[in-house]
Amino acid sequence: MRCKILFMFLSNVDIRQALKNGQIGITPFDEKRLGSWTYDVELGNVFRVPVSNSVKFIDPRKDKHDEHFRIVELKEGEEFVLHPHKFVLAHTKEYIKLNEEFVCILEGRSSFARWGIIPHVQAGIGEPGWEGQYTLEVMNMNEVPIILRPGDVLAQLYFSKFITPTDKPYYKKESGKYQGQQGPMGSKLFTEFSKI
């Protein structure tokens, strides 16, 4: 027997209603970015750039992210150059808030993907009860540098609603270490192993 997984996504009408009811939040919200069933999100102005240094390896279970990345904050009108086959952490300009009934999925836009930009390697799910700016794990798969600008619409959000609200929202999880994140948040994987 084959199992089918079905999702019911919100239309633009549903998204507007959920915003009005306070069930989801998008700050800042711009009606022009609302499509028929998606919301376009903009690239923020802060980047976490990997630092090339003399370390032989990184141990994600032990190392703190800040030790291996530097912060670059762009001013109005400045650009960020992402070199070929390089990776950077960025963030959405928008702050998203979900109640216990909603989940949010971030997906890259095809127009940037066709230039070799992967806006997020993983972590595209906003769990029910989560709030914050999305951290984007951006990669340049092209053979030449690509210019990124704050305000570029690299990704879009899809919203889905549960039949029954969860009784385990993200804000109640002991492991909910990315709640309320702003700017590009580094990995906090080490916290899971520091308790062992």
Image (cartoon, grey):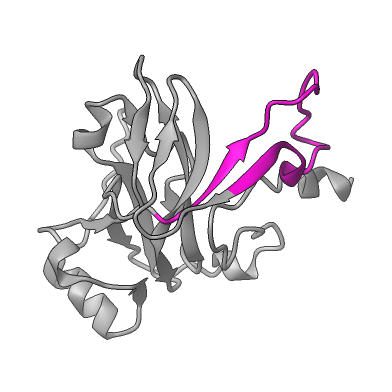
Residue beneath the point at 44% across and 25% down: 83
Residue beneath the point at 35% across and 41% down: 148
Magenta segment: does it hold 48?
yes
Residue beneath the point at 48% across and 47% down: 90
Q: Is residue 75 left or right of residue 29?
A: right
Residue beneath the point at 76% across and 27% down: 58
Q: Is residue 102 visible?
A: yes
Residue in front for this viewpoint, 123 or 28: 28
Q: Is residue 50 left or right of residue 53?
A: left
Magenta segment: does it hold 128?
no
Find residue 14 and report its image quarter.
bottom left
**How many labels were placed on the picture?**
0
Q: Is residue 61 above or below residue 38?
A: above
Q: Is residue 171 above or below residue 148?
A: below
Q: Position of residue 111 (x, y in %)?
A: 19, 35
- The single residue placed furthest to the top in the displayed view is 143
In the image, the segment drawn in magenta is 44-71
Residue in front for this viewpoint, 181 or 79: 79
